[in-house]
Image (cartoon, rainbow, N blue to C red):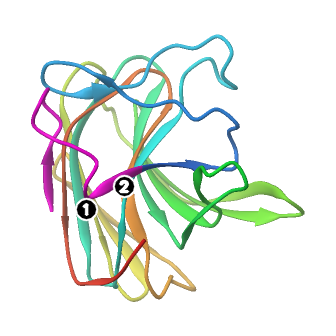
Amino acid sequence: MKIDFSRGAWDTDDMTYAYSYRFEETPVFIQCDDCVQNQRNSEARYGFDNISLMSRKAYAPGARISTRCSFEGDGAPLIVIADKMFLDPRGVVRYGEYMEVVLYQNGVNVWRMWMKDGKVTWKKLMSVEFTVTHGDIHQLTTEITGDRLNIEADGRKMSVLIDPMYHSFHLGINACEGINRFYDIVIEGETVQTV
C-alpha cells in the first residue's frame, strides 16, 4: 500500500483514524497541498492535536512501513505499531497496546505502551541521539521482524529487540505534541486480517 497525502490524492479506504486511550480528543488531519498535518489546540492535552492514521488490515512480522515527514519545534512525527484495534463505546477506533518509533529534534526514541488499571503506561525501549533539523523532510522506516524493530532515519540504521513481539499488528503514523506533517506512507508485507 502506498498513499500520497497530497490534496485529492488519497482517501481512507486503506487507512482509518484511530486513537490511543492517552487522549480523549479525536481530531482529524488538516489537508494541505502536499501533505497532511495536525494543528495547535489549546484544549488538547499537550496543546496540539494528537492524530493517528492506521492500516485497516493487520500485518504479519516481516512487514515494513515508511513515511516522509517533517516537524516544527517540539513536534515528533512517529510510526505506530498497534497490537489490536477495536471500537470504544462511543464508536471511536482505539488501540490499547502499541509501540511508537519517534523521530524528533534529538534523534529517535522507541516506546512501548500498554493498558494498566484502565490507563496507558509506557516504557522507553531505545534512544539514539543525533540532530534532526525541523522544517526539513525526513525519511523514517521501520521493519518489524519476529523479535525486533529495524529502524532507519535519514540513512541512520538502528535496531531494538522486542520481547514479546505481537503476532500481528496494525501500522500507521501519528502526529505527536508539536506541528507534524506527513507527505506519504508506504506499507509492505503480508496481511493477515481486515477490520
Q: Position of residue 36 (x, y in %)?
A: 27, 28
> Left or right: where does residue 111 sit relative to residue 9?
right
In terms of sequence position, does the residue under pointer 1 or pointer 2 come before the other?
A: 1
Task: State the residue position of label 2.
Answer: 172
What span is in magenta? 1-16
> Left or right: where does residue 119 sit relative to residue 101?
right
> Left or right: where does residue 118 sit relative to residue 41?
right
Q: Quadrant of residue 84?
A: bottom right
Q: Position of residue 93 (x, y in %)?
A: 55, 54
Which residue is drawn at the image coordinates 69% and 50% (left, top)? Answer: 21
Q: Nearer the viewer, residue 109 or 4?
A: 4
Which residue is drawn at the image coordinates 57% and 86% (left, top)? Answer: 164
Label count reads 2
Within 10 Å of disc 1 (Cα), the crowding (few <14, some 14-19, many 20+) is: many
Kind of residue at badge 1: Ile
- Look at the image and tell me in which quarter the C terminus lies: bottom left
- Residue 8 part of the magenta-drawn span: yes
Within 10 Å of disc 2 (Cα), the crowding (few <14, some 14-19, many 20+) is: many
Q: Secondary structure at mark 1?
A: strand
Against 56, is 134 above or below? above
In the image, which is nearer the foreground, mark 1 or mark 2? 2
Task: State the residue position of label 1.
Answer: 65
Q: CA distance from mark 1 to mark 2?
A: 8 Å
